[in-house]
Amino acid sequence: MAGSKNVLELHGSVLRNYCMKCHRFYNAEYIFSSLGIPKCSCGGLIKPEVVLYEEPLDDEILKKAIKEISNADTLIIAGTSLNVYPAAGLINYFKGKHLVLINKEKTQYDTICDLVIHDSIGKVMEKIGMNFS
């Protein structure tokens, strides 16, 4: 939505939703306009296409993420404690030149980064002239 062309949604998106019974897809507008728990015309519950805790990540997307990170010259990691795996382990595939971490709190990876900024993403992006609101 911000104009990026190559986005890997590691944890999915709430903008895509599907029936857990018949697998029919529903857009976000349908979900947002539903009263209560959204249900499909077949009676099944509609779930966002997101990875919840203890669910596995999509293996193909994970492989693509590893490839992109491995080939990146600069990696900016923002808004994560880097405590939840396997996503947190993706930092270990970075072999480029510039590793930047933006997070409110310290992380276990702060010492290996070239630049660490302990602040909110919104404030940092605002200071460099990017507004996402």
Image: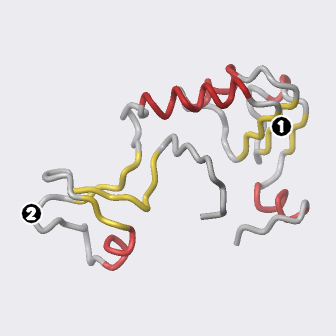
Question: In the image, what residue occupies the spot 77% across and 48% down?
Answer: 104
Instruction: Please state if 105 lies on the left or on the right of 56 as rendered.
Output: right
State the SS at label 2: loop
| Placement of 115 over or under 22, stated as above or below | above
Looking at the rendered structure, the number of numbered marks drawn on it comes to 2
State the SS at label 1: strand
Quadrant position of the N terminus in the picture: bottom right
Q: Which residue is mark 1?
A: 100
Mark 1 residue type: Val
Please state the horizontal and vertical placement of residue 127, each as a whole percent of the image.
Answer: 90, 62
Please state the horizontal and vertical placement of residue 48, each as a whole percent of the image.
Answer: 35, 55
Instruction: Please state if 22 lies on the left or on the right of 130 as rendered.
Output: left
Q: Residues within 10 Å of mark 2 (few under 14, many from 20)?
A: few
Q: Nearer the viewer, residue 21 or 111?
A: 21
Mark 2 residue type: Cys
Q: Which residue is mark 2?
A: 42
Q: Nearer the viewer, residue 117 or 23?
A: 23
Q: Quadrant of residue 65?
A: top right
